Amino acid sequence: MLQHYYAVIMAGGGGTRLWPLSRKRRPKQMLSLFDERSLFQTTVARVRDLFPVDHIYVVTVAEQAVELQAQVPDIPKENYLIEPMPRGTASVVGMAAVVLAHRDPQAVMAVLTSDHYMANEPRFRQLLQAAYHVSQDGYLVTLGIEPTFPATGYGYIQQGERLGEYESMDVYRVKRFKEKPDEEHARLMLASGDHAWNSGMFVWRVRDIMEEFRRQMPKLAASLDEIAASLGTAEEKAVVERIWPGLENETIDYGIMEGARNAAVIPATDLGWSDVGSWDSLFDVIDSDPDGNIIMGGRHVGVETRDSLVYVNQDHRLIVTIGVENLVVVDTGDVLLVCQKDQAQKVRQVVNRLKEEGQDYL
Amino acid sequence: MLQHYYAVIMAGGGGTRLWPLSRKRRPKQMLSLFDERSLFQTTVARVRDLFPVDHIYVVTVAEQAVELQAQVPDIPKENYLIEPMPRGTASVVGMAAVVLAHRDPQAVMAVLTSDHYMANEPRFRQLLQAAYHVSQDGYLVTLGIEPTFPATGYGYIQQGERLGEYESMDVYRVKRFKEKPDEEHARLMLASGDHAWNSGMFVWRVRDIMEEFRRQMPKLAASLDEIAASLGTAEEKAVVERIWPGLENETIDYGIMEGARNAAVIPATDLGWSDVGSWDSLFDVIDSDPDGNIIMGGRHVGVETRDSLVYVNQDHRLIVTIGVENLVVVDTGDVLLVCQKDQAQKVRQVVNRLKEEGQDYL
């Protein structure tokens, strides 16, 4: 195992893109979509070979901590860091950085998502190993994903100068971070061959990221210093809870990475990655039957049914589909979603509407 | 009210075309689709002005009789005639005819369906009055429906010589009965202007229909005579149950009407009729909202949802539809049907498949 290497899993999201299956109190990382394990459990299992269990940290919100601890009971309880409230990934990374620096000033942290899918797990570990070595040269490393279609739902990273090969992987200086593009720009970037998707996963030495916080987000850095000073004292919890609500609500991408002096990217190929960000994305990661259908749970009778997904969490329910194509049917008992596949991103609109109307089902 | 006039409502069907809402033990006539009344209750209410309640008969099967009696308690119990088992409409009509003839040799019987919809009920009563008068001239009268589209799901009746006007309605001799046509023939018949749909409803004097039974179905007629002889005796029930299983399984259309000597048809216009024979047919009889949707029960949130039907029988269920068009969604708790509107007739295939597999849900 690599010295001073720590995983920081961000598991506080309350994502609603797999609604109605994902809910406020049962976000995507807690769901079992591919096997009996939740995405969070899979995330931990994926990196166990690289990190001793006490080197694995989880940042989450109080309401989710108990369930996550129950799902992976061997991560030490003190490694669960609690965000008092959502304040963006910059604050999450900052808190984790000061906690790690307090324990191990030489710490290298891998900031990992908790709810992504990867078909090729050895490849991911290779990527984390390469990134570790790149971080030793002082870079803030972004784990890139080789784009396979002109996605408009992800940010892109343009590669600059090639920095060399680490663990048989090509590594580049970051030329530019780009926000989610429109369809046309997505096509151009895909065709260019020098763009990767931004996976939202990063590797860096804590001292390097703290330096960038001081340079680019000095107010947040000062707050983090206050938290750092309280660590291990009786006031720790009170200080975090006092400071947290006043923090800037900012993402690490926008707050730090876009302006970082030494950003590197490793465009990972053959990772079989998906952010499982919408119902239609399941078709990328779950094998469908000969008619192109994915049937999860319940009993299904299909007549002229193609390229559709049926999810039911009640075994006795019979689902009959006739003459449908590219349809997503998700039945959670209290809610039934019927959605054309290419409109799956509009689930978010519905969730927002329910929120505004003060409805349940969230 | 017209003298010696009786209604015979055929309510023994176990139709499955509105499955999963209609079931073996809850066939279409027992369903409430348009208001709080069942189709059977609506059928009775529609003709109350024409028939004293003791002139209304119901033919059904034993399993349905209790529920039907509960739905319309003021029809005398002895007016419920029980088919020991399904043996086609010829036998049903025959049994009703001998029962009526036993009570009133001058009886005129109106054979009515129990599960059809009619928007214009006064028009239907006018039709029944006209048919009564035509029957007095010795005709077997078919209630026709003016076709409004080239339906392939109904039989057609070609009009011959005009017999005259009865109650302001034109009446024709039947030239020919035609089985359910293919699309091309349906178009031709619609264009011809001299074809009506066969509604499966008839009016005749019992003595005329008995004569036709003797001429065209002598075996059935002999069996009916045996039943007639037992009426009012202690053996009545035993005789019916002994004879019934051996009866020819035949429809009145094929067994009698196609070869009838004096068949007349009254093509009813403006009846607003529907046999409610499939989920898509509900669009003909229920007003849709401005997006063309029919939402029945539950709570519905639609995003880009058009010309679709959502039926749920659980008030607390939230149904969300996104990007769907011409879709039928029917949720009965144990079964969820999702069906493209123009494939609604394939529900029957599914029901047959479940039957073969010995599954529940029927």
Image (cartoon, coloured by chain):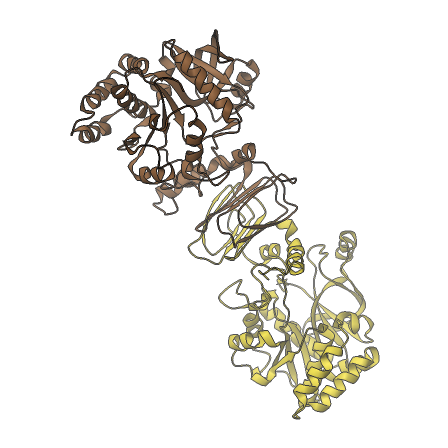
Chain colours: A yellow, B brown
Res B241 quadrant in image: top left
Q: Nearer the viewer, residue B107 or A338?
A: B107
Residue A35 shown left or right of residue B259 in the figure = right
Give x and y (percent) for residue B75. Answer: 34, 32
B212 on left or right of A206: left
In the image shown, does B169 or A59 lie closer to the viewer? B169
A243 or A276: which is nearer to us? A243
**Residue B140 horizontal/vertical position (percent):** 38, 14
Q: Quadrant of residue A197?
A: bottom right
Vertically, is A12 above or below B168?
A: below
Residue A277 on image: x %, y %: 64, 60
Image spot of residue B210 (x, y percent): 29, 15
For the question of whether residue A104 can be seen, the reply is no
Name the quarter where the N terminus of chain A is drawn: bottom right
Q: Is residue B43 visible?
A: yes
Q: Residue furthest left?
A: B234
Please tell me whether residue B151 is drawn above or below residue B19 in the rendered image.
above
Q: Quadrant of residue A244?
A: bottom right
For the point 30% across and 24% down, the residue is B96
Horizontal relation, residue B243 to residue B89: left or right? left
What is the count of numbered marks?
0
For the C terminus of chain A, which image quadrant?
bottom right
The residue under the point 62% across, 69% down is A123
Q: Is residue B205 above or below residue A63?
A: above
